[in-house]
Image (cartoon, rainbow, N blue to C red):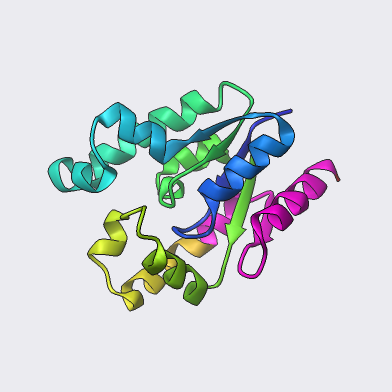
Amino acid sequence: MESIVLIGFMGAGKTTVSRALAASTHTEVVDMDDVLVKRIGQPINDYFEEHGEAAFREHETALLKEALTNDSIIATGGGVILQPENQKVLADKLVVYLKADANTLVHRIREDKVNMRPLAIKNDDGDLKRLFFSREKLYEKLAKITVDTSEKSPKEIVEEIIQQVAS
């Protein structure tokens, strides 16, 4: 099985779905945010503050390329699609866009007390929605498969991904 790369905005369910999908397919999971936190030695939010987004994106691109060398389920960060180099890397990969409407995403982001997202801390709800809409076309362009996660359980999402990958 080739790698399955999950993309989508913050709160779309990439981490949750990647774990469930990996368990269901007996495949390794690479949660890029988790790996990056270990590698940079601090929370992403702190790294953004100290070194800036550009430095973070360099680490992210290197990890994406590395993760794709093994068959795995890869949960990307929401901004991975912004870098032209990452877009090229993902162009011929099995990319699944986990999509949800903007209101659902903002609600999930605000309710998540475990993941403090740098862009969510310094932006209000309107800014987050605008950020989502500015990225939406890139997510859609890169996706081979799109799954709406707004009203589905992780189990239902995993079943839909497996079904679409098999078709």
Left/right placement of residue 59 relative to residue 41 reads right
Residue 152 found in image quarter: bottom right
Residue at the left extreme, as displayed: 50
Query: Which residue is painted at 32% across and 35% down in the image?
Result: 37
Q: Compare residues 87 and 29 and report the one nearer the observer.
A: 29
Query: Which residue is painted at 26% across and 30% down in the image?
Result: 40
Query: Which residue is painted at 66% across and 60% down in the image?
Result: 153
Left/right placement of residue 60 relative to residue 25 reads left
Instruction: Residue 101: say if magenta.
Output: no
Name the main secondary structure of what is drawn in magenta. helix
Q: Compare residues 128 and 45 and report the one nearer the observer.
A: 45
Number of marks drawn: 0
Residue 93 visible in the snapshot? no
Residue 136 visible in the snapshot? yes
Residue 112 drawn above or below residue 16 = below
Question: Magenta span covers which residues?
Answer: 137-166
User: Quarter holding the C terminus?
Assistant: top right
Q: Position of residue 139 (x, y in %)?
A: 54, 56
Residue 3 drawn above or below residue 12 = above
Left/right placement of residue 162 relative to residue 154 reads right
User: Quarter holding the N terminus?
Assistant: top right
Q: Position of residue 27 (x, y in %)?
A: 66, 29
Left/right placement of residue 146 relative to residue 48 reads right
Q: Position of residue 92 (x, y in %)?
A: 64, 37
